[in-house]
Image: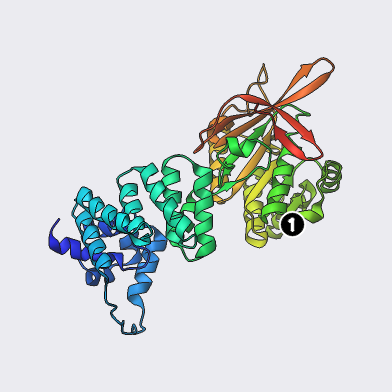
Amino acid sequence: MSKNEEEVLKEFLDLPGVGMSKAKALYEAGYDSPEKLAEASIEDLVAIKGITKKVATTLYEHFSSDEEPEPEIEEKKSDDDILLEKGVGLYAKGKWGQALQIVNDLIEENPKNIKALMVKGDIYLDREKYQLALDSYDVVTELDPEIDNAWVGKGNALLAMEKNVRAKSCFKKALAINPDNDAAAEKLDEDDRLPTFVDGLDEMLEGGVPSKHVVLVCGRAGSMKSSFCYYMLHKLAENEGRKTIYLSLEQSRQSLLRHMKRLGMRKETASTLMVSDLDDMVVVDMAALRKEGDVSNEIDWLGSIINQLRSYKESFGADAIAIDSLSALYSLTTFTNPRSELFFFFEKLRDLDLTVFLISEMYGENLNQYGPYGVEEFLADGIIHIKTEAYANRANLFLGVVKMRETNHPRDYFPMIVDQYGFGIVRD
């Protein structure tokens, strides 16, 4: 690297939201000075690989500010700071071995040199030496647990090591210390997961169901799939304050709530859970059609469901929705081209930007098909299958995660228990 490039990278590192990787990305995209960067639009910056919209907006606002910056009082740098800057400069030139030597010498002289430890962690993280990076960040958080960027570094290292649950905890810790830490917020947004609160299942799913997935919850009649979905939404509302909606197309609202109350789930403890039934849907949709003056044509129930969910989200807000059930919805719909129409239905569900659970019966000659048209399992992001097996004079429940995108999970079936404490699976 030329000396000029090194100087530019150092200047970029002083900008809000810019670390070494983003500084390099900006320079390689042709921005060789802060002045040139100041001329870029948000769209220009977002087009650069590695620059998110949030970072682009922050940079644009930084350069667009009309306020005159207060004159900075230049502090005298210590010998250690000067030496550390030299190490950063060497690393910017690609001489990471020499840079590490300087950093390690500083740490050997002062094991509590937090700045040097952070640079050491950053270098190892960039070099994909994730355990060594984690070790360095661990020392920093032990010395000062209030350094938010150290927790972000730990989260990034753990994420690269596929330890997603621990990584998420680190990003949450960073945000608790500094709510304006964009890097932590972006990582949490990328890997937001909704816990199921089913004992043993969240650990198996690396923390829960990935946010904004469309998930089939399948089983024969009597396999408690409706109760299972209601339980997840109830706990999300009760324990995390997530806004959830249970949309029943078969069972009435009163009947559903009575049943769940018998399972120990009281609506008043989950105030952000909304329950709707088919009667509500008919009133809303028919009223809308009457206003348009056309009730002769069949109702487009797939479209009506999408519109209703969109309306719920805008007025109520929602993180997760369960639709009970696909068979009831299909019974209202006349398909001309099921594969095509269901493809667009699933895509529109994804466009809602929330997590959707679709309750489905099992189909096929041997009841091994997860939807009546045989395409649902390919269109869904995940499949949770609850099956029943007869033993002696009782039917035992087993749960298996057949499919869950963006998740490393076993595909075994585990005994599922339901008691006064809720749902759980036995993995031992």
- Residue 48 shows up from this direction: no
Seen in the image, is 96 located left or right of residue 312? left
Residue 316 in the image, given as x and y percentages of width and height: 68, 60
Seen in the image, is 360 located left or right of residue 251? left
Q: Crowdedness of circle 1 by 10 Å Cα count: few (<14), some, many (20+)? A: few
Q: Is residue 352 above or below residue 251?
A: below
Seen in the image, is 101 located left or right of residue 154? left
Residue 218 in the image, given as x and y percentages of width and height: 67, 31
Circle count: 1
Residue 369 in the image, given as x and y percentages of width and height: 63, 24
Q: Residue at 21% across / 61% down in the picture?
A: 86
Give the camera-side residue of 118 and 50: 118
Residue lying furthest top: 392
Residue lying furthest left: 2
Residue 74 in the image, given as x and y percentages of width and height: 28, 80
Element carrying mark 1: helix
- Residue 341 shows up from this direction: yes
Q: Which residue is under mark 1? A: 287
What is the basis of the colouring in this image? Answer: rainbow
Q: Residue at 40% across / 60% down in the picture?
A: 53
Indicate the quadrant where residue 40 lies: bottom left
Type of the residue with mark 1: Ala
